[in-house]
Amino acid sequence: MRTLELPSATRAAGVLRLPGSKSISNRTLLLAALARGTTELRALLDSDDTRVMREALAALGVPVVAREGPEHVVVTGIGQAAGFPVKEAQLFLGNAGTALRPLTAVLGFADGRYGLSGVPRMHERPIGDLVDALRRAGANIDYRGKPGFPPLAVAPFGPGRTQALRVRGDVSSQFLSALLIALGWSGRAARVEVEGDLISKPYVELTLGLMRRFGIEVRREDWSAFEIPAGVGYVSPGLVDVEGDASSASYFLAAGALGGGPVRVEGVGSESLQGDVQFARVLERMGARIAMGPSWIEASSGAKLSGIDFDANLIPDAAMTAAVLALFATGPTRIRNIASWRVKETDRIAAMATELRKFGAAVEEGPDFIAIDPPASFLAPRASRPEPHASRLAPIPVDTYDDHRMAMCFALASFGPRPVRINDPGCVSKTFPAFFDEFARIAS
C-alpha cells in the first residue's frame, strides 16, 4: 500500500486558490447537458468525481469539449427533449454520489435503456428512497443486485401516475436534489414533499440556486415541500464560473488556526453558495481568529482552542475537520446530527472514531454523533515537546478507507507531537488531487 509520511508541523501560513467545488461542478455539468444552448464552464473541478460525470455525459451523446484543459469546458445541451442522443449505455460512476444519484433521476425520465454502477462501496450506499419516488412518477428502474442499492437498470419512462411525489429527507439530501433537477428537465409540473427532517439543507439550497441560474424557479414551502413549474425546461446562462470548494477550504483554515497563520483561501467567502463556509464560524467558536470577504476567508491562531458541542447537520463534510481539531482542543468536543456520515464513502463515524483513538483520544460514537476527549500529549505546550527528536518518533499510521476526506482531515494531525503516516494518500484524487502538495506548501 502506498503511504505518505507527514513530518511534525508547527507553522502554517500562506495563500491558496481553491479548486472548484465538487458539488457545484457536477450539478452544473448536468444542468448544462440538460439545457437549451451552449454553456461555458470555467474553474471546473478536475477530479475523479467530475471525470466520471463528464465521461457519463459523453457516453450519453452530450458534447463536452475541453477548451483550455479540463477546468475549462464547453457543454452543448440537449434541451427539453425525450432523452439523450445515445439510447443505450452502461455508465460506471465510481464512488461519486453527486454523479450516480442525479443521473439515475434524469435517466428515469428519459427514453433509453441504461445501466448505472460504481465501485463496491457505491453499491453499499442506499438509493432506495430515490428509486421509490421515481417509480411513483413513472420511471422504470430495477435493481441488478441488492434491493435498495446500486447497480441499477433503467428502462424507458412510462406514463406518470402522480404529480405529488414524496421522498425521504433524513438519509441523503442528494435524493431530493436529484429529483428536483430531473423534474425540472422533464417539463412536468410536480410537487415534491419531504418525509422526515431534511438534512444538509445548504446542499438543497445550492441545487435550487443553480436551477434558478438555468432558468427554473422552484417554489419552496419551508423545507417540507417543493413545486416545480410545468413546461419551462433549462436554458443555458452562457457562462458559469465555478466557485472554490468550501469543504476543501476547511482543512487549510484549520491549519491556520493550529499553525499561527494567517492562512487565506480564495474562491469562497461571504457570498458563497455553499453551506460549508459556515465552518469558519465553528473555528471562531473553538477560538480561532477569522476574517472574511466576498470571495476569501482567512484564519489564524487566537486563544487556545476549546472543545465545543455543535449540531453539524448543515455542514456534515466540513464537520469532519472539527473532529480532528478536537485532538488539540481543551475539553471535549461533541458533534451531533451526523447520521449521514454512516452512508458516505465509508462509515465515517466508525472510521473517525477508530483513527482518533490511535492518537490517544477517548471517543464515544453513536448512531448520529461522535464525542472526542483529547489526549494529554496534544495539549502540552509546543515549547515543552521534544521537537529536536520529533523526526525520530515513529509515525502514527492513519487508514483512509478509500475516503478522500479521511485523508485530508488527518493531515492536520501532523501539528501534533508525532509524525503522521497517511495510508493510500491517492484517495484524495476523488476531489482534490493536489491536496498534499498544497498542504505542504502552507504547513511546515
Image (cartoon, rainbow, N blue to C red):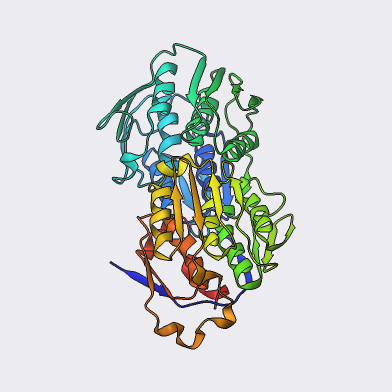
Q: Is residue 401 visible?
A: yes
Quadrant of the image containing the N terminus: bottom left
On the image, the x and y values in percent for residue 391 come to 43, 83
Front residue of 278/430: it is 278
The residue at the point 64 percent across, 32 percent down is 215
Front residue of 63/377: it is 377
The residue at the point 51 percent across, 74 percent down is 440
| Residue lying furthest bottom | 388
The residue at the point 57 percent across, 54 percent down is 245
Q: Is residue 318 visible?
A: no
Query: Which image quarter: residue 266?
Result: bottom right
Q: How many marks?
A: 0
Whether 387 is drawn above or below 423: the answer is below
On the image, the x and y values in percent for residue 347 come to 38, 47
Query: Which image quarter: residue 325?
Result: bottom right
On the image, the x and y values in percent for residue 188 come to 53, 18
Front residue of 54/352: it is 352
